[in-house]
């Protein structure tokens, strides 16, 4: 990992992303770039008796002052290399564009709440859009958790048991090992629809005995996957719940985890969940940081952006 990008709207709430960014930067020896997006509508607003050139200069000056203050806070927190930049446009588009066009961005760290207003953007909704569109991993941090010390000791790693899900687990393991953290592999089994015979639509087991057998295969898959991981301590857990995202958030809270690491895509089906949409909802409702990883089934964790 060489470059960490931290979007900010200059609100105190958006500073929730600072401490995690510094922790990752110090662990990997990475530089931090703080980016602010000036809303294009406000930047190019036309008002009577308003000189647009002076308006632009004032916004740019204030933006640079706020960015300098943000960089100073990050440096005071222990970041060794901090850069700043700003763009004019739509927040989530400009942030993801920065990732796509600036080589070497390995991690985005965003706060999941902010407030709107002059030269501000609503970080909460922007965070979900960034998670959906970003090509690099995104660490989302709830602004309500700013009083907590950021540390990675116990990590919850949800998976849907798909090839993409397994690839994300391998990435999560590599990062957790860097921090000396423990892992719990977590699978949410959505309740099946029972019937008198095989389902003509889904072809899935519909008798209790068949469902029990399938759940045993879930645990076998997790156990096999756990044996391939390098983290010192790995446990597994399977729960039945109708809503995977709520189950993940609840397990994270009840289990006392420090962070959730999960993939952004998965498979569909009666006994599976669409991990992409689940990841976005977990980002919204989880009370602890969520690292959303970007994996393909054939991803090599040795060459991904989180090295």
Image: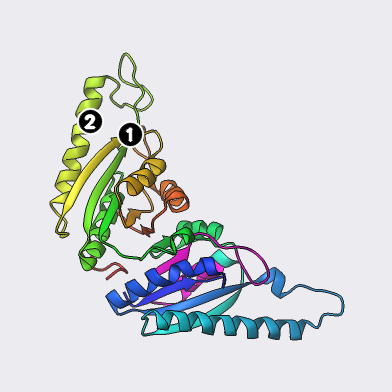
Do the numbered discs 2 and 1 sit on residues whose CB atoms are within 8 Å? yes
Residue 106 to residue 133: above or below: below
Q: Residue at x 36, y 22 (%)?
A: 200
Residue 108 part of the magenta segment: yes
* Quadrant position of residue 66: bottom right
Q: Residue at x 30, y 20 (%)?
A: 198
Q: Position of residue 266 (x, y in %)?
A: 35, 47
Q: In this figure, which residue is indicated by the disc labeled 1? A: 271
Q: Position of residue 32 (x, y in %)?
A: 41, 78
Total marks shown come to: 2
Earlier along the polypeptide chain: callout 2 or callout 1? 2
Q: Please tell me which residue lies in front, 183 or 302.
A: 183
| Crowd around label 1: few <14 · some 14–19 · many ≥20 (10 Å) | some
Q: CA distance from mark 2 to mark 1?
A: 9 Å
Residue 120 part of the magenta segment: yes
Whether residue 45 can be seen here? yes
Q: Position of residue 106 (x, y in %)?
A: 36, 71
| Crowd around label 2: few <14 · some 14–19 · many ≥20 (10 Å) | some
Q: In this figure, which residue is indicated by the disc labeled 2? A: 214
Region in magenta: 93-121
118 relative to 37 in the view: left or right: right
Whether residue 106 can be seen here? no
């Amino acid at each position: 990992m060489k470059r960490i990008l931290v979007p900010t709207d200059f609100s105190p709430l958006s500073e929730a992303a600072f401490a995690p960014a510094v922790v990752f930067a110090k662990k990997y020896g990475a530089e931090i770039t703080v980016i602010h997006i000036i809303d294009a509508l406000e930047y190019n607003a036309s008002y009577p008796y308003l000189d647009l050139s002076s308006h632009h200069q004032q916004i740019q000056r204030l933006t640079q002052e706020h960015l300098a203050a943000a960089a100073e806070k990050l440096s005071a927190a222990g970041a060794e290399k901090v850069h700043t930049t700003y763009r004019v446009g739509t927040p989530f588009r400009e942030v993801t564009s920065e990732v796509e066009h600036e080589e070497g961005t390995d991690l985005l760290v965003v706060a999941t709440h902010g407030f709107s207003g002059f030269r501000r953007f609503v970080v909460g909704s922007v965070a979900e859009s960034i998670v959906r569109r970003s090509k690099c991993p995104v660490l989302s941090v709830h602004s309500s958790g700013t009083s907590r010390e950021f540390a990675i000791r116990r990590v919850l790693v949800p998976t849907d048991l798909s090839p993409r899900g397994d690839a994300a687990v391998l990435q999560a393991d590599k990062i957790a090992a860097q921090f000396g953290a423990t892992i719990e592999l977590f699978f949410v089994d959505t309740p099946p629809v029972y019937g008198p015979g095989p389902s003509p639509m889904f072809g899935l087991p519909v008798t209790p005995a068949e469902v029990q057998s399938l759940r045993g295969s879930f645990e076998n898959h997790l156990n096999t996957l756990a044996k391939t991981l390098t983290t010192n301590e790995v446990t597994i857990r399977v729960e039945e719940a109708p809503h995977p995202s709520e189950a993940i958030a609840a397990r994270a809270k009840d289990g006392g985890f420090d962070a959730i690491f999960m993939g952004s895509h998965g498979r569909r089906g009666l006994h599976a969940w669409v991990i992409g949409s689940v990841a976005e909802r977990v980002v919204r409702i989880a009370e602890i940081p969520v690292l959303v990883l970007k994996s393909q089934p054939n991803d090599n964790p040795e060459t991904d952006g989180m090295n």
